[in-house]
Amino acid sequence: MKPAAGFGCTTLALLLLLPIAGTAQQPETQQQRAQSQPYNNAPVWREVRSGKEEYTSIKGRETGVLVQTYGETWRQLKNGWITPIAGWLIAAVVVVIGAFYKWRGSIKVHGEPSGRLIERFTPFERYTHWVVAISFVILGTSGLVLMLGKYVLLPVIGYTLFAWLAQLSKHLHNFVGPVFVVSLLMLIVIFLKDNLPRLYDIKWFANLGGMISGEHVPSGRFNAGEKVWFWIGVVVLSLIVSASGLVLLFPNFDQVRAVMIEANVVHMVSGGAVLAISLGHIYLGTIGLDGAYESMRNGYVDETWAREHHEYWYNDVKSGKVKAGTAMGQPGAPQAQH
Ligand code: HEM
């Protein structure tokens, strides 16, 4: 039979380390126990598990804490709750979006294209958006590999490939994170004004933007659904995910382990939530709504598209209240599709 090497080594290490860390606070108790029940180290373990900082000659944050039981609470919370809930939530959103697409298909423009184009996004707005979007997709994919890979990929691709993929994901996550944070702040500033709530947004909510009924509901430059994405997904959740990510990325500010644990929990919860919500935005920005992707790709929309999807904004552009360029005279401007 194999000896219980793990337990033996840990106990030995503890007995060697305890006097150094000065953890044996109740020598009588341990002494008594050693006499009444030889080899029973329960009092020492209890003392160690208390997490109390004891004396050590090695100076540094928490060097006097031998065993930190908060870490076990974190492990259980992460593996038992956060990871499975986030994983199933994202899977459920994919299924709901897939079912919606099958039922509704791509939302089309009803009227004939006018052939006249209005500038919807300036090049600066578009570049900023795509830097945020591309870095977000890299962070989301690498984050999912790190969070779920052990359960979903490892059994399929094996240790060799998974180790390589996890390593790559970790590096991508670390280096792309700051790009996302900086571009996110710029994006928030750029789009803040047009995402301020307006009274007519209530009507949009009441009709769910006509997405179910197919009815035409007027809105400003951004509709109420986009505003929800902006305030909840982009501002609140993305800022929380960024701030907690920075705490994890730069552990050199003397954060104690509890702070790192809490930052990790906040990062995973907010990251899982923003990923799930972003799927709705990505769906509508690609296959869900005809013409939306082209508007962010090229910057221009047909007047009919603008009138049907963002009527108040269209009226403001036409009346000159809001400045927006037209494709006329712009070299390389995209042509309207008939
Ligand atoms: C692959 C990923 C993405 C795609 C395909 C995509 C696509 C689009 C498209 C097509 C629009 C224009 C919609 C319109 O004309 O009204 C748009 C707007 C916008 N996107 Fe994205 N996007 C992506 C990721 C992101 C991410 C990660 C963020 C932020 C974290 C973001 C933030 C925004 C914002 C703020 C707007 C302006 C509308 C609003 O304020 O809600 N996008 N996106």
Image: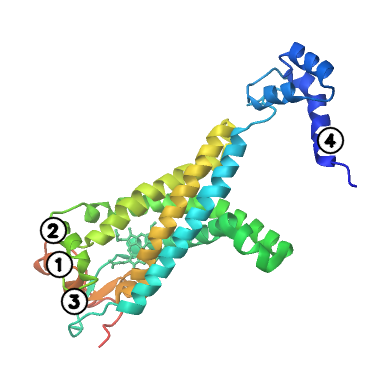
Binning the other alpha carbons within 10 Å of mark 3 as few (below 14), some (14 to 19) or many (20 upward) gives many
Secondary structure found at label 4: helix
Question: Residue 336, relative to residue 150: is it above or below?
Answer: below
Looking at this view, is 79 or 263 the one in front?
79
Instruction: From the top left corner, tell me how far across and down residue 19 is, in percent.
Output: 79, 19
Q: Residue furthest front?
A: 36
Instruction: From the top left corner, tell me how far across and down residue 272 is, in percent.
Output: 46, 54
Name the mark nearer the viewer: 3 or 4.
4
The first of marks 2 and 3 along the sequence is 2
User: Which residue is labeled 1 in the image?
Assistant: 218
The first of marks 4 and 1 along the sequence is 4
Disc 4 to disc 1, how far (Cα)?
72 Å
Where residue 274 sits, quadrant-wise, is bottom left
Q: Amino acid at mark 4?
A: Gly
Name the mark nearer the viewer: 4 or 1.
4
User: Which residue is labeled 3 in the image?
Assistant: 303
Q: Is residue 274 left or right of residue 213?
A: right
Secondary structure found at label 2: helix
Q: Quadrant of the C terminus?
A: bottom left
Looking at this view, is 189 or 327 the one in front?
189
Q: Residue furthest left?
A: 319
User: Which residue is labeled 4 in the image?
Assistant: 8
Disc 4 to disc 2, how far (Cα)?
70 Å
Q: Amino acid at mark 3?
A: Glu
Instruction: From the top left corner, tell me how far across and down residue 145 is, in percent.
Output: 58, 59
User: Which residue is labeled 2 in the image?
Assistant: 200
Name the mark nearer the viewer: 4 or 2.
4
Q: Amino acid at mark 1?
A: Pro
The first of marks 1 and 3 along the sequence is 1
Q: Residue furthest bottom?
A: 338
Disc 1 to disc 2, how far (Cα)?
8 Å
Disc 2 to disc 3, how far (Cα)?
21 Å
